[in-house]
Amino acid sequence: MGAIITLCILGIVVLYLGLFKAKNALLPVTLLGLVVTLGLLVAEWNNEALPQLHGMVIFDRLALSFSILCVVITGLVILLSKEYFKNISTYLSEYFCLIIFSLTGALLVNAYHNFAMLFIGIEVMSVALYILVGIRKTDLASNEAALKYFLMGAFSTGFLLFGITLLYGASGTFDLTELQAYVQTASEISPLFYGGVLLLLCGLCFKVGAAPFHFWTPDVYDGAPILITSFMSTVVKVASFVGFLRLFSTVLVPLHDFWTPVLLTIIIITLFIGNITALLQSSFKRMMAYSSISHAGYMLFAIIAIGATSVSGMLVYAAAYSLASVIAFGVLILVKRGSGSENFESFNGLAKREPMLAFVLTIAMLSLAGIPLTAGFMGKFMMFNNVMGTYNITLLILAVINAAVGVYYYLHVVVNMYFRKSEDEVVAQHVPISYKVVLIVAAVLTVIIGVYPDSILGFL
């Protein structure tokens, strides 16, 4: 709980720093606050996991491991933020503050033990992003993305709240432990409960960007500032999946036969829509947006084949996907700054101009494609292994086909960087120290997790 309080205080302190024009202190103070938050989370690792705040939150291993991941990824994004946002506005404190408050909401979603806290966490996480997505007031694409995100967010929240209402009407409680007891001991499950499960499933699929509830994702990711897209596609998506996993693993396992066919259909649609549409894109950013939909399908494997290894599999996959996404969007910022374009052609000849950028982006693309010796391979292997354990061979075959499609469009970027020449004369960009640090750290972690997965699994 100390981590939540620290982040709230940090957000207020950052606002005051902006008020008193202390721009040079923003980045070090924010990073220091994140380090303190990380230390508080690590300090709770061996403590007994008990519900806190009258059963509202619980910082168990699930919450702590994913919260640590979210804080680390946010730290990497923050390191990129100062250089990026100073080209958009002089008011840096607002950006830092909103990212910190969104991270606070993500930690609440990771640790919720009561539906009231799930709702509060999602709203805190999302409201800050509504502003960040539309932060470029003179950019029509950014304005459109913010409006779409707000409308779709409100729409999905309606599903979520209606589902929670039906579950409460059937069981008389918002607490996950009491809901679990109701499902396990009730002589007959109320039809209201089944309706609530379906509506919750719809609401959560909206949040994670799974098809057919994905239609907001490409336009919002494309219209938002690149760095905000990076934060949304990593921290926000990971936290939403943790909320998804906690509900289903704690409460809904006994009703597995009811929701499995629905979720299985969603996964198959998500994989095909995400990969096929990503294959057709000419913009790197939109390709990443559509590929994030397909990755949502892979991460749902942990829920469809829910079991003892679901948490570890999702943790490795989430870490791999987040690190690779930070690298990809970080390189995209620099490439767009030099060429003015987000298309694949803007990456032509990057290996000659900026070999370091091309090398780390290659590691990211290989990881996202699931090539061995990268974290992405280990994530996919663990997810596929979970599905094999439930003997869902049809889903496994379809997933392998989609993974092969993913390899094609990810390697498209690598081919452009190493084997195609730029038609226009592009001047090599100066790479700030903060970008070099973030890209190298993320690439090294991607390889370490791929070669030695126990480096992350050993903590669970």
Image (cartoon, helix red, strand yellow):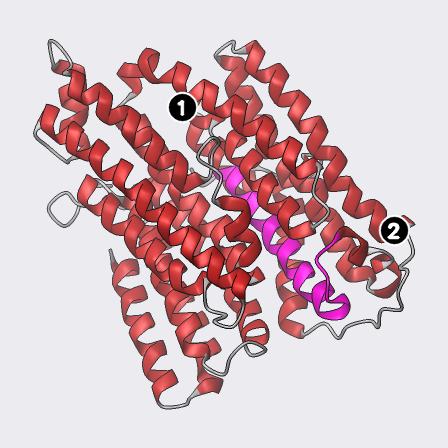
Name the residue: 69% across, 50% down.
284
Residue that numbered label 1 is attached to? 308
Principal secondary structure, stretch drawn in magenta: helix
The local secondary structure at tag 2 comes to helix
Front position among marks 1 and 2: 2
Residue that numbered label 2 is attached to? 418
Relative to residue 27, is residue 107 drawn left or right? left
The percent coordinates of residue 21 (x first, y second) are: 41, 90
In which quadrant is the C terminus drawn? top left
Q: Is residue 314 above or below residue 348?
A: above
Which of the 4 image quadrants contains residue 127?
Answer: bottom left
Front residue of 297 and 306: 297
Relative to residue 357, is residue 276 drawn left or right? left
Which of the 4 image quadrants contains residue 337?
Answer: bottom right
Magenta span: 315-343
Farthest left residue in view? 172
The percent coordinates of residue 180 (x first, y second) are: 19, 24
Relative to residue 444, is residue 142 drawn left or right? left
